[in-house]
């Protein structure tokens, strides 16, 4: 029976493959049914015999098409149309007032159309066949109360009864076959999907571990660089050069902190923005060893941010906080740093404020200010600075939901 097995379809989609296999096995079963009915009808009724012969011929062509084309949609649509025509032909031309068998067969092909094509085709085929049967004159007259309707079976010939019961039996068995096949196909699909999902999950876990390891190594490498910079600065006597090394070290640390947060996070694509700012501020305060008590208040409507988008923010905040810690709290008894981030339409409004007083007047140009300018431009944003009472920066930076949640 190996030759009856469904060939492999061209599609890799599980549902398409399932529909193709159901179409193939439906044609195989229907071929044998019509082939057997040919022998029942050959001495009985020429009209029934003609329908059976057409069924054998059509299913043979359908199987050949499916075997060579490995595609089922066209043959399924043609089958739905042809079978509807044949059923309606049988309803209105065959001499038999009992239409039970016809009802069974139009249900079969409606069910076939539902699964192998789509729901719309199934509904249309079902309605056409149902209406055709409903308007069959003896049934219509019965429902209108014109005549009494019964469901007799011809007693003229034994073969009539055999024909009826065979059609009825084959129809019921065919429905059972379709239902069992549908259930088995869905079980098979679910099993394959579970296996594939498990494989995808395993691959994702492997990639997650690998990416975390990469971020961990990048963090370690950046920490090594920052350590080398600190070691190198010990051999330098010039205070300005030492200060530049210290600033460069802090910038590297700000970058390293991003990779550290990614490594610790369950979600590699997004980082907790508030947590990052708190860690950055804490590290910078520790680095500059400020004796003045400093309170830090961070309020943000941003929960998560992509690492790529965070890089520019990290360097901007590093410059802002560094300048505050270096210059603003030399004469203050209590220091305060406030960061407020608001989402307004598609724009981030970032307010940075400290209550410090600069001993020396703030420079209008410096490497740090130039870096803030450059990074803000890269983000397509703009900012304003106010130093009348403490220091305040207000940034307006456009964003999209892919970068920020």
Image: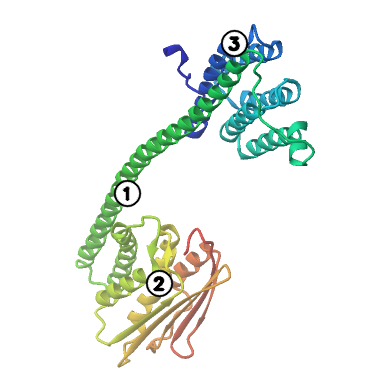
Quadrant of the drawing holding the N terminus: top left
Residue, disc 1: 208
Residue, disc 2: 317
Residue, disc 3: 40
Q: CA distance from mark 1 to mark 2?
A: 29 Å
Q: Compared to 105, does 160 lie above or below? A: above
Q: Compared to 234, does 24 lie above or below? A: above
Q: Is residue 305 visible?
A: yes
Residue 348 place in picture, x, y as percent: 52, 71
Quick one: label 1 or label 3, which is nearer the N terminus? 3
Which residue is found at the position 23% from the left and 58% from the top?
224
Which residue is found at the position 62% from the left and 23% from the top?
75
On the image, which quarter does residue 322 sit in?
A: bottom left
Q: Compared to 207, does 95 lie above or below? A: above
Residue 198 place in picture, x, y as percent: 33, 41
Of badges 1 and 2, nearer the viewer stands: 1
Residue 266 as seen in the image, left or right of residue 387: left
Total numbered labels placed on residues in the image: 3
Q: Are marks 1 and 3 in contact (CB under 8 Å)?
A: no
Residue 274 as seen in the image, left or right of residue 348: left
Q: In the structure shown, which secondary structural element does the residue marked by tag 2 occupy?
A: helix
Q: Compared to 223, does 333 lie above or below? A: below
Between 348 and 85, which is closer to the camera in this rendering? 85
Between 314 and 43, which is closer to the camera in this rendering? 43
Q: CA distance from mark 3 to mark 2?
A: 89 Å
Of badges 3 and 2, nearer the viewer stands: 3
Q: Residues within 10 Å of mark 2 (few under 14, many from 20)?
A: some
């Amino acid at each position: 029976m190996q030759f009856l097995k469904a060939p492999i379809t061209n599609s890799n989609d599980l549902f398409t493959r399932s529909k193709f296999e159901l179409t193939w096995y439906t044609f195989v079963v229907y071929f044998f049914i019509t082939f057997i009915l040919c022998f029942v009808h050959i001495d009985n009724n020429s009209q029934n015999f003609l329908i059976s012969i057409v069924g054998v011929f059509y299913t043979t062509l359908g199987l050949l098409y499916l075997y060579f084309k490995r595609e089922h949609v066209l043959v399924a649509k043609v089958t739905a149309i042809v079978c509807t025509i044949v059923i309606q032909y049988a309803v209105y031309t065959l001499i038999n007032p009992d239409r039970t068998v016809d009802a069974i067969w139009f249900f079969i092909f409606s069910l076939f159309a539902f699964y192998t094509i789509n729901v719309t085709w199934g509904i249309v085929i079902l309605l056409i066949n149902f209406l055709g049967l409903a308007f069959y004159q003896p049934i219509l007259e019965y429902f209108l109360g014109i005549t009494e309707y019964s469901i007799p079976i011809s007693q003229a010939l034994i073969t009539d009864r055999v024909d009826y019961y065979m059609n009825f039996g084959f129809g019921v068995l065919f429905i059972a076959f379709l239902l069992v096949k549908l259930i088995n196909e869905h079980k098979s699909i679910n099993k394959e999907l579970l296996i594939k999902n498990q494989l995808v999950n395993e691959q994702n876990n492997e990639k997650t571990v690998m990416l975390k390891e990469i971020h961990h190594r990048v963090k370690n490498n950046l920490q090594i660089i920052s350590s080398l910079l600190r070691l190198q600065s010990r051999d330098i006597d010039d205070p300005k050069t030492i200060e530049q090394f210290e600033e460069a070290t802090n910038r590297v640390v700000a970058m390293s902190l991003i990779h550290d947060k990614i490594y610790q996070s369950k979600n590699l694509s997004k980082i907790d923005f508030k947590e990052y700012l708190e860690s950055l501020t804490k590290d910078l305060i520790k680095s500059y060893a400020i004796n003045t008590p400093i309170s830090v208040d961070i309020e943000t409507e941003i929960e998560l941010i992509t690492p790529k988008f965070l890089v520019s923010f990290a360097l901007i905040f590093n410059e802002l906080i560094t300048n505050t810690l270096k210059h603003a709290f030399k004469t203050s008894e209590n220091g305060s740093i406030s960061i407020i981030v608001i989402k307004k339409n598609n724009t981030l409004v970032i307010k940075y404020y400290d209550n410090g007083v600069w001993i020396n007047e703030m420079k209008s140009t410096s490497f740090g200010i130039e870096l803030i300018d450059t990074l803000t431009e890269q983000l397509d944003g703009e900012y304003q600075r106010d130093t009348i009472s403490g220091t305040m920066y207000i940034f307006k930076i456009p964003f999209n939901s892919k970068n920020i949640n």
